[in-house]
Amino acid sequence: MALLRIRHDGDPVLRKKSRKVEKPDPIILLMMDDMAETMYGVNGIGLAAPQVGVNKRFVVVDVGDGQGLFKMINPRVIATSETSCVDVEGCLSVPGLQGEVERPETITVKAMGPDGKYFKKEAEGLLARCIQHEIDHLDGILFTDKAISVWEPKAEEEEAGEDEEGGEEDSGKAPDARKVVIKAYQLAQEQQQAIFAAGG
Ligand SMILES: [Zn+2]
């Protein structure tokens, strides 16, 4: 097993649409083990293949709710609840930022397991949110694209955030004064790129 290098926002691999996997070959199986080790090593709750530089459709998820580790190949949301909820998300590929994202509360996901067989799984709460976040990665989408608001948490909050990031009951106490509503963050990035392009 090995720790993998996590790619950060700005790396083109995070913006490509990933390819479907035909069957779980040994390399993919090994890679999912390494992704799980990497995820646990940084207290993450999910990791998608593009985040470690591979544009193929597989993810690992363990939100620490006692259900354990899910390895999902070609995961697809096949049903969602009509109700949605807003909660705080972060991302190992977007360090130093958090944001509020609205997503369906409950989902049914269909995915291939490491044994090559497809399974269905109903998920709610943090697990549902995390699976949707990881599937977004497979389509080149980052949470900052969807976020209602994005902000830089204070250092101590980042730590606390790791534990409570989930529960819907927490969404009420999302930061307010500091809530720099930065789509500006993305705009700044685009402007920078434009400046580079112009200056280059
Ligand atoms: Zn992410």
Image: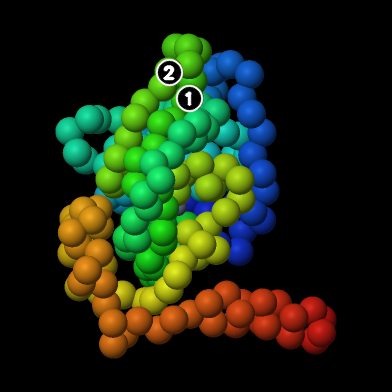
Left or right of residue 84: residue 169: left
The residue at 48%/12% (across/down) is 117
The residue at 36%/26% (across/down) is 121
Label 2 element class? strand
Quadrant including the N terminus: top left
Counting residues from the start of the chain, the first of labels 1 and 2 encountered is: 1
When asked about the image quadrant of residue 67, the answer is top left
Q: Which residue is mark 2?
A: 119
- Distance between the alpha carbons at the discs numbered 1 and 2: 6 Å
Relative vertical location of residue 46 with respect to residue 30 in this rendering, above or below: below
Given the image, on which type of amino acid does mark 2 rest? Answer: Phe
Query: 117 or 176: which is nearer to us?
Result: 176
Residue 13 visible in rendering: no
Given the image, on which type of amino acid does mark 1 rest? Answer: Ala
Would you call the spot at circle 1 few (<14 residues within 10 Å), some (14-19), or many (20 or more)?
many
User: For residue 111, which numbered disc appears in the image?
Assistant: 1
Would you call the spot at circle 2 few (<14 residues within 10 Å), some (14-19), or many (20 or more)?
few
* Contact between labelled residues 2 and 1, with CB atoms less than 8 Å apart: yes
Label 1 element class? strand
Residue 173 visible in rendering: yes
Relative vertical location of residue 198 with respect to residue 151 in this rendering, above or below: below
Relative vertical location of residue 70 with respect to residue 174 in this rendering, above or below: above
Across and down, in percent, residue 68 comes to 24, 30
Across and down, in percent, residue 18 comes to 64, 39
Left or right of residue 175: residue 58: right
